[in-house]
Image (cartoon, helix red, strand yellow):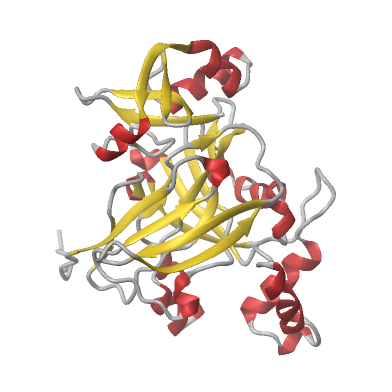
Amino acid sequence: MLLVQFLTESNERRVGILNDATIRIIDGYATTLELARAAIAQGQGLAALADAAAGAGHANYDDLARAGRILPPVDHPDPAHCYVTGTGLTHLGSADTRDSMHKKIGGDMEALSDSMKMFRLGVEGGKPAPGTPGVQPEWFYKGDGSILRASGKDLDMPAFSLDGGEEPEIAGLYLIGDDGQPWRLGYAIGNEFSDHVTERQNYLYLAHSKLRNCGVGPALLVGELPAHVEGVSRVIGLDGQVRWEKAFVSGEQNMSHTLENLEYHHFKYGLFKRAGDVHVHFFGTATLSFADGVQVKTGETFEIESPAFGPALRNRLAVHDAPYVKVKRL
């Protein structure tokens, strides 16, 4: 099942079930968050409640997308109660890169870079037995809910950025129950947009490079993630033509960590189990245009598509002013 949030012509929020280009509007719940809260309270699955509450109303996805009325698949009315985070060095890459990657991480551990050490730790200990913790992944913070951008909205990078590049990823979407229990609502395709030039200067700049907008959606995939996910990432030039394109794979079959292990090492912290909070947690990537020497230009469009997640995620690159901030003494 795919769920989509959108705005009506009168600017009212709605959520519905997407089938092809038709959205069956859910009655009684205006948002994914309301629907999820009710599912927890009633002790039933999100898909079952959504199906039972779907009414006679319909909307056309393509019309909504053209009008710019698609919303992120989950959000929170108070953006400060939505965490956006992620993990890196989690993917094995495509079949033709795995042999070279294993050669890079072989041999003496102390001779490896810190990144390759982290990757090797994941390969060796990222898939423990169910119910037991494995090795910790790399972890990063991106921001709160104010950085989420729906399909069709710009990804704004601050003027001081050295680069704005896509990272096609799958994100887990979560709600914390009243008792502090994390509940996974499902998954969405995402663009974990980052500043790769800043990161490349020094890996200790990773935290700076991640504090950017990110694209998520348009749809929430309810249920389990397929073990093998295929997709395509594109950069569309100012002339409307594709100027870079590459396939990517994800899912546990193509990862060095289980999703359970990545989730455990995020939600083991009490800070991330605050009742009522929403979490958007990216699981990592193995494909990006920056690695192929592409620098995306202002006004060009990122397109990330995977059949399992319905319509493509599209976001244009934009730049916003970032004036010098001088702190005042009170």
Q: Toward the viewer: 24 or 39?
A: 24
Q: Where is residue 186 in the image (x, y as percent from the top left)?
A: 57, 36
> Quadrant location of the C terminus?
bottom left
From where the camera sits, is residue 172 visible?
Answer: no
The residue at 51%/61% (across/down) is: 140
Looking at the image, residue 110 lies above or below residue 71? below
Q: Where is residue 3 in the image (x, y as percent from the top left)?
A: 48, 30
Q: Where is residue 285 in the image (x, y as percent from the top left)?
A: 57, 62
**In-image side of 105 versus 184 (left or right):** right
The residue at 67%/37% (across/down) is: 224
Q: Position of residue 137 (x, y in %)?
A: 65, 62
Q: Residue furthest right?
A: 129
Displayed quadrant of residue 64: top left
**In-image side of 143 versus 159 (left or right):** right
**In-image side of 280 versus 315 (left or right):** right
Q: Toward the viewer: 196 or 65?
A: 65
Looking at the image, residue 288 lies above or below residue 249? below
Q: Which residue lies furthest to the bottom in this view?
A: 111
